Structures are given as C-alpha cells and as structure tokens.
Image (cartoon, rainbow, N blue to C red):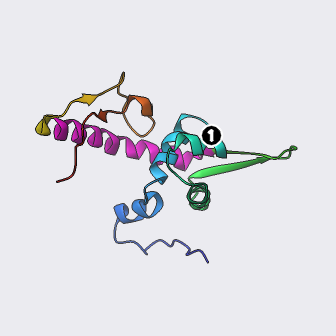
Amino acid sequence: MRIVRRPGAFVCGIDAAMDVIGGKWKVLILWALNERTCRFGELRRAVTGVTEKVLSSHLKELEDDGIVHREVYAEVPPRVEYSLTPLGLSLNAALEPLGLWGREHIYRGAEEAGVGVDVGGDVGVGAGADCAAEPQVVAGLGRG
C-alpha cells in the first residue's frame, strides 16, 4: 500500500524535495527524460545499471508525484512513452545548481588528489546536460 504524501508531513522544503527525488536512480531518470520522451527500453539503456523492477517502480512513483507523464498508445503491440510534466521540468531546473556544484566538487577533489579528469567535450550545466559530457575521474578518487 502506497503512503499518500501530505502537506505538513515534512520538516522543510528540502525534506519534501528529497522525498520525491530520493534514491540512486530517480535523478538519472529525470535527466534522461529531460533530453527527450522515452520508451521503457530506451530509459533502461540510458540509465545504466538500473534493473527493470527498480526502473518500473521509480517511474510509477514519479508518475504518482506528478513529475512524469505516462502515455499509452492504443496500438498493437502497445506502445508506452514517458515524458516530464511541467512540474518535472521545473524540478530539473531546480536540480541544475546541484549538478553544477557536483561537477565543481569532482574537479576540486580530483585536483586535490592529483588525479586527471577527462571532460569528454563541452560540459553542460544542470540535470539536462549531455551525460557523455559529464567529467569522468580517470583514476580512483575515493571518499576518504
């Protein structure tokens, strides 16, 4: 049974936002859908490492929260596409500064550790930036 989210059940706005985007995969799903409308299989390939069960569960939760729109086409075979709602687009816009902070944090950590960072092209800003352009740490940069 799903718990209904209620105003007032949260300590602050960050608490409410984290309830919607919490978890390892939801922000990556949001990023992928910010690029374009996707079918389930396309999302599964775009979000490397997510299982079908978890992806399906997260999509349902994001749909329940009004972040993702699920469009079912009456075709044979059936076709289902996922896209962001206006609320989902505004959430991605709110996540852009967090994405910028994360990239700066990776660069700073890599420089402090003396590790090279491969940018792989132009680095975009925000959750909707091209994932291929995200900086990749060349050598192991751990948290410790």
* Residue that appears at 65% across and 43% down: 41
Specify few, some or many for label 1: CA neighbours under 10 Å numbering under 14, 14-19, or 20 or more: few
Considering the image in quadrants, where does the N terminus appear? bottom right
Magenta part of the protein: which range? Answer: 83-110
The answer to whether 13 appears left or right of 61 in the picture is left
Residue 46 sits inside the magenta stretch? no
The answer to whether 106 appears left or right of 78 in the picture is left
Identity, as a three-letter code, of the amino acid under mark 1: Glu
* Residue that appears at 62% across and 40% down: 42
Q: Position of residue 18 (x, y in %)?
A: 40, 61
Q: Position of residue 31 (x, y in %)?
A: 48, 42
Q: Nearer the viewer, residue 10 or 100?
A: 100
Check disc 1 and report the residue beneath it.
42
Query: Mostly what secondary structure, the magenta segment?
Result: helix
Q: Position of residue 13 (x, y in %)?
A: 37, 62
Q: Nearer the viewer, residue 108 or 49?
A: 49
The answer to whether 110 appears left or right of 127 in the picture is left
Q: Nearer the viewer, residue 90 or 20?
A: 20
Residue 90 sits inside the magenta stretch? yes
- Residue placed farthest to the front in the image? 139
- Where disc 1 sits, the SS reads helix
Q: Position of residue 58 (x, y in %)?
A: 56, 58
The answer to whether 24 appears left or right of 60 in the picture is left
Q: Is residue 114 above or below residue 4?
A: above
* Residue that appears at 16% across and 54% down: 144
